[in-house]
Amino acid sequence: MEFLGTTQVASYCGTRKSCLFPDPAPTSTTKDTYQSYYLPGYRHLSSWRPSLLHRVVSVPPSSAGEFNPTGRPPTVLPTLRSALHSRYSIRDWHHANMVQLKGSEASRYWAGRLNTDSLRLMQDKDQLTHQMQEDSSRNLGERISNIDFWRSELAYELECLLKETQALETAKKRLECAIGEMQGPLKTALECLYYREKRKEIDLVHDDVEKNLMKEVDIYKDCQEILAKLAQRINHQLGINRDAQHALEQDLSDKNSAHFIDVKCFNLRNTSDSINFYHGVEKADGTVSVPATWAKFSEDNIRCSQHARANSVRLREDTEVALESTSEELWNHFVSTNLAFNNRIAEVADAKNKLQAQLAKVLQEIFQTEDTIMLLERSIMAKEYPLKVAQTRLEGRTRRPNIELCRDAPQFQLVTEVYTIDDTLQTLKKHLQEARDTLQTLLHNKSKLEHDISVKTNSLFIDKKCMEMRKTFPCTPRLIGYT
């Protein structure tokens, strides 16, 4: 290995042969003029400077005795140094150039073919991608048309089902109204029977009025049972209608959502802002139907709705017949059992007057007890301030220094005062609690008396209204459910 900037002195070093330029003609009398040479791959210290060139200065021949202006003797290299420059031959150099040119030609040829194939491939794939996108858009358009068809069918059937359901609900309301209208006369008849059971001694007779009342009650109950069963059937049919309606609405909602999504997908273009990459979405198949099952699903929903509408029409016809027959039968029995009741009014009125007199006495006692409670509370409040004074005095005397903490007469008196006032307060509070308990008892008795009076008043009102209730009967439109 040589050092940078030094000369070669080995015996095998010879004249340097350039691999880039032809050898210059000898200009010196010395054949082995030295030129710096570096091994292949070994960089010179200043090789990065393009302006630095190593040249051999031409020196005219001169004798040994002539003056050398540079002061340096000519460099004489051994003849064996030329062996270092004989690594490659001219044939190798031409072969290397030929290989380089052929490799370059081959790479350029293959690059040209690749470019041509790439352009043709890009054109084919662009055409294929465009065609596939057009096919997808056409399929989406056909799908949107199919969805629009089933949407219209579902919407029409849903409208018909809603109208039939509304009519059936109206029939159900008529049944409920008819049952409710029967409840009033039935209640009246039951109340009449109840009060006639309270008759005393000889008045407890099983006359024609009681027989007609009992028969009337049975007819009311039978008619209510018939109408109630019919209402249950209607209620069950309404559940079926709602299920069919829910299926239609759900199917229509799904169709609307699918229509919106497909229209949105149909309107997507390569220049749209909402497009994005979703890697792996083509591998996940979340479909649950095929076109045949998809169409059959909507067709089944429509058929189920039509069957529910047919059943609803039959139920409405049965309801109309039942309402007319029951209303006529009830009116005939009501006419035959419209009699007078004048029992128990005097007895109930007398009991009510006695209770009211007792209530007045209880109210007077409540007022006196409340006054006593108020006086006790004032007395307790009046004892609190003396207790505060005594306890404050005791607390202040606890701060006397050293020997002054004497258990003297004032100390005993204050302690006695505190205990006495506290005992007085406890006694007053105990009496106050007893007075409050007594007041609560009086208030409870007052409440019971008022309740008994209200019961008697209600009984008296029912007795007086018995005839008035029997004088009225629901009209035929009300009995068949019209309000």
Image: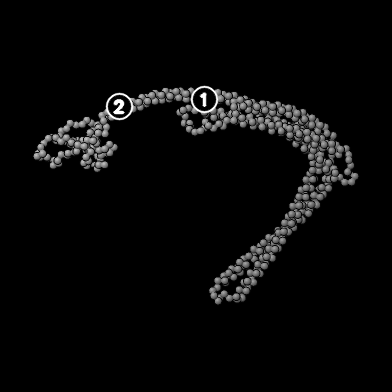
Q: Which mark is residue 168?
A: none
Task: Give the Cα separation between the discs numbered 1 and 2.
Answer: 56 Å
Give the number of the mark in front: 1 or 2.
2
Which of the marked residues, 1 or 2, is nearer the chain's N terminus? 2
Which amino acid type is shown beneath numbered disc 2?
Met
Q: Position of residue 62 (x, y in %)?
A: 11, 36
Q: Position of residue 319 (x, y in %)?
A: 75, 30
Camera-nearest residue between 16 and 159:
16
Q: Residue at x 26, y 30 (%)?
A: 89
Which amino acid type is shown beneath numbered disc 1?
Ser
Q: Residue at x 77, y 56 (%)?
A: 361
Corner quadrant of residue 96: top left
Corner quadrant of residue 100: top left
Picture quarter with the N terminus: top left
Picture quarter with the C terminus: top right
Camera-nearest residue between 97 and 153:
97
Q: Position of residue 169 (x, y in %)?
A: 70, 32
Question: Can you identify the residue that label 2 sits on?
Answer: 98
Circle 1 SS class:
helix
Q: Residue at x 77, y 53 (%)?
A: 359
Question: Can you identify the residue that label 1 sits on?
Answer: 136
Mark 1 Cα within 10 Å, few/some/many (few <14, many 20+)? some
